[in-house]
Structure formats: structure tokens, C-alpha cells
Image (cartoon, rainbow, N blue to C red):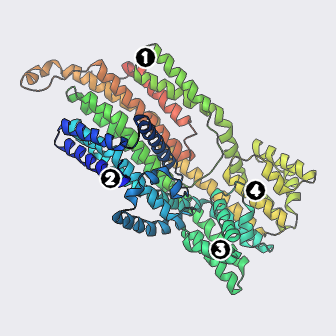
Amino acid sequence: MYDVDKRSAISLGSFGMMWSGLFLQNLVLFFVSGGILAASLMFSADAKEFFRRISFYLKLIVTKLGALNNGSLKVSVGTNNAIINFTRPILKKKLVTSIQNKLNSKLETDIRTAGRAANPRILAMQGMAYMFVAILVVVPIAIFLGIFVNLMFFLMLIIPPMLMFYPKIKLKSASSERRTAIDDEMAFFTMYASVMQTVGKSFYMSILEIVGKEIFPAIETESKMLDRNIRLFGMDPITALNSHGMTHPNLHFRNLLLGYASISKSGGDLGQFMERKSDEFFADTRFKFSMYAKQAEIIGESMLILLNILPVLLMTSSFLMAGESVQMIMSISFVVVPVITILMIVIVNSFQPKTKNVVKFHVFSVLFGGVAALIALAMGQPYWLILALATSIAAIFNQIATAHQFREISMLESALPDFFRDVTEYRKIGIAIPNALIRIVNQRSYNSYFDSLLSEIATNLSLGNNLTKILESTVIRSWLGRASFFVLGKIAESGGGTPEILEQITNFSGKIKETKKEMIGGLQIFSYMAYASPLLMIWSASGMKDVMAKLGPGMQELMQNGMHEMTISPEFLEVVNLLMIICSLCMGLIMSKLTHFTMKHTLTIGISSTIAMISVFAAPYMPSFIK
């Protein structure tokens, strides 16, 4: 019986011969070397054990790759990892070990900035092990398909090195997410911490109290990490804050932690420091909303150019092309337009302030849209009509089902500035916040939803319940409302908080309300143009069809001299209609994201798809380009 090293040498040699057979296009050499490879693997085991082992490893590879795709980076012991054990003879090689050591040093920094509990040595070993397994599986397939099918399959060769660096890429992504997710929570969190500081609660105690409240999810994660450092590593709170801030990827949060630790050690005024930081973060947040209002208009203009004007130009010019224009429009419809839409949504999401509102998408709307599509398909309707019906019905049904959620958010946020202004005035004359809420309910009206919400809170207050507990049990869909009421509850509970702090919330909520109103007003023209774009597209297509029909008899002589025959087939018109439907759907998605901060608001999508569908049926009745 051969030992492991001899079998490995035979396996690697036969594997190299398989590669040579692929490059030389010698199938005999390929299959013979493949047989040697299989025999070397089976030498010390019978066929049943061999196939059982191969099946086990294939299932394990799929499971591990699925775990990687889910973004889980877990600490595991190398001896318990079957893929690492499978590739351990290669991992022990000197060259491979040196590469692992270099990866270790790079991963250590990434783990600290990502805030993950992971072992860099294990992650580096996993990346190398997955790369070698991918080489065994992917490389022969890529070479074979690249030689005998299409050269594009050679791109599969980048999969093994990507798997080696996947842990690093994933850690970089987690670090970036950690850096950006916390920015939108800083303003209200520092205000809350400032209020707590005035009544003698430290920053560390304030950050611990938000765990489980689901108000500041990103900062909750930081709180758990700080608590871990204190409990497991025996740090005192100030040292833990300083250590946490040194490696945090977000500059603002890092400066907050380091500044607080520094002033605490020097004996400075922590309350004044927190109040100054609160003012700074509120100003930054207001600036982000103002900048977004300007950037959203640029995105709206780009959307019209890329998803309206450009498709119209390509569509009209395709009438002058040969039969391959159908394939070109299909490529634009199913590849170019969706890619442009995804990129624009990603760009919008990158600079758009996160609202974190609680809106539940109605799953049954997808079911209704699917049923409508199946019925249209069974009736033999064209694909453009199937797509338009499915998207219109699903979008409109979801909007009807979720309209009350968006209405609650809108009504609450519109009433917040006036409400906090009233609370501030009562606070200035010395009336406690719970008593102020009861008086406001009896003396003031804002809107139907906000009045009912305040009435419920006031009723519970009259029964002697704590305001903070009442607010925790109250469903508030708006994140701005939840954060504002959370701070208000902490002010009432602690007895601290000055009228200036309440005035700050009032000014902030009023500024956000005005900025959103200006933004929606500035984007209104783009919404109207998005609704009108299907009419423009179908009118252009109908006009070009009439032009080609008019010029067709007079161009026969040119066609005989070598030009392609220009025919407008029903298939071509169906593809043009499909392009129009897809462009309308994509513009509706972008406008929903721009104006409502979420694609769960599907009214724009439903209107765009419906107008596009109606436009196709109305095309024969539209005025033509020519008489």
C-alpha cells in the first residue's frame, strides 16, 4: 500500500497530465491521465469507500461555499475542518506556509477594523484550502470549456484566487459597512448620551442601556463589543472606550470615543463635550439631507438620459438595421437596462441618508402578480404584456396593502416639529414632560394619526405608567419618530435635559421636513417625465414604423445594390414593446428609491407599468410623423 505522500505525488502528476491533454487537445491523454488519477485515489480503498468519500467532500464544499456566501466568518479549529484536513499535505509546504503567514498579518488589522471575532491564522488557512479545492474542481472545467466551447470560460480561472482572498474581501466589506452604518445614528445617540451625562450617567452606561431597544442597531453592536472587552479582558470602561476607538473605522465615532476618554482622564467637563458633539452631529446630518436633495436631481437627470432618451435613440436607429437589431434590443432590454438600473440604485443608496423606517412588504402581492402572469401566458399573450400585467398588479396591490404604513410615517414626521415646539414651551415654564403631554392632548390637534398616538400615550401616563416603558411598547414605524421619542422618554425619566436640547430636536425635525419637501418638489418633474416616457417611446416606434412603410417602395433599388432588406416584423415590434416596458419598470424603481428612500413604495412602479401597457394599445390612435 502506498503512503499518503506517494499517492499525492501520483495524483498531482496525473492531474498535470490531464492539463497537458487539454492544452494539446488530446482526449486520449486526458482520459488516460484521468484514469490514473482516479486509480491513485482509490488505491487504498475500495470503490464504495472512494465514491462515499468523493460525495462527502462535494457536499462539504457546497456547504462551506454557501456559508461564505452568507457572509459568516466563523472561528473554527483547523483539525475539525474537513477541507483543511483534505488539503493539509499541501498547506504544510514551505511556500504555502509563507504565503499564509503574510495573509495572517494582513488579516489581523482587517479583523480589528471589521469588529469580528475571528482567528486570522484559521481564516488564512481556510482561504488557501478553498483555493486548492477550487483548483481541483474549477481549473480543469474552465480549461476544457475554454478550449472546446468558448474562450470566455477561461474567466472561471479567477475563481480560485478569489476564494483565497475572500476572507480579506469579506472583512473589508464588513469594515466598510461598520463605518457607514453608524453615521446616521450619531446625532440622536449623542443627544441621548448628552442628556444622560447631565444626570451623572457615563457614556459607557448610556451605550449599554440601548441594547435590545432596536433604536440604534449599529451602535448596539458597538455596545456589545465594548461589554465583551470589559467582561472578558478585564478592561475598565475608559480603557475599553479608548481601545475600541483606536481601531474603529468610522472617524466620527472614533473621535467621539477617544475624545471622551481623553477628557475623562484629564478631568474636563464631559457634559459640555457631549453637548458640543451633539450639535456637531446634528449639523452634519442636516447637511447630508441638504446635499442629498441636490444629488437626487442629478440622478433624476441621468435616469432620463440613460433609460429614456438613449433607448429611444437606439430603438429608432434599429429600424434601419438588418435582422440582428432584434438581438441588439434584446441585449439592451435584459442586460444593459437592468445593469444601469442596479448601478444607479447602488449609487443612490451610497449617499442617501438611511431612514430605517419599519415598512413590511406585502408578500401576497408577488403571488397575485405571478397568477396574473400565468393567466396571461396561458392565454397566449405576448411577453411584454405578461411582464406589464405582472408588475402592475403586484405593485398596485402592494401599494394598497402598505399605504397605511407610509401614511403613518408621513403624518408622524410632519407633526414632529410642531409637537416638540409645544413640549419645549411647556418645559420652559417648568412643566414636566409627562404633564406637558397630557396638556397637549387636551389643547392641541396635529393630525388624525399623531393625535391618536398622543392620546394613547397620555392615557397610559394618566394611569401612572412610565413614559419610557410606554414608548417602548408603542409601535412607531418612523425611525425619526422612534429616536425622537426615545430621547424624550430618557429626558423625562432622568429629570435632566434643558429646553435647548428640546429646541435642537425641534430645529432638526423641522429642517428634515423642509428638506424632504424641497427634494420631492425638485424631483416631481422627473416623476412626470418618467410617467410620460412610455408615450414617447411608443410614439417614436410607431412613427418610425410609418416612415419605413412610406420609404420602403422607394428603397428597393438601394437594397438591390447590396443593402440589407429592412423589414419590420411582428417579432421586432414585440421586442420594442418589451424594451419599453422594462425601461418604464426600471425608472419606477429608481424614482421610488429617490423620493421615498425605499423600493417598497411601489406606487411609481405600478403607474409606470400601467401607462406603458396602455401606451402600446393606444399606439395605433396616436398622430403619426407623416401624413
| Disc 1 residue type (three-letter) | Gln
Percent position of residue 196, x then y:
77, 69
Q: Which residue is mark 3?
A: 241
Label 1 element class: loop
| Disc 3 residue type (three-letter) | Leu
Q: Residue at x 64, y 39 (%)?
A: 360
Q: Work out which residue is located at the far right of the displayed protein and give it.
A: 463
Relative to the observer, which residue lies in front, 75 or 36?
36
In this rendering, which labeled residue sits more in front, label 3 or label 4? Answer: 3
Q: Work out which residue is located at the far top of the displayed protein and give it.
A: 379
Real-space CA distance between mark 1 and mark 4, rounded to the nearest whole angstrom: 53 Å
Q: Which residue is mark 2?
A: 6
| Residue 527 appears left or right of 365 | left
- Tell me which label, 3 or 2, sits earlier in the chain: 2
Label 3 element class: helix
Q: Which residue is mark 1?
A: 381
Label 4 element class: helix
Q: Which residue is mark 4?
A: 485
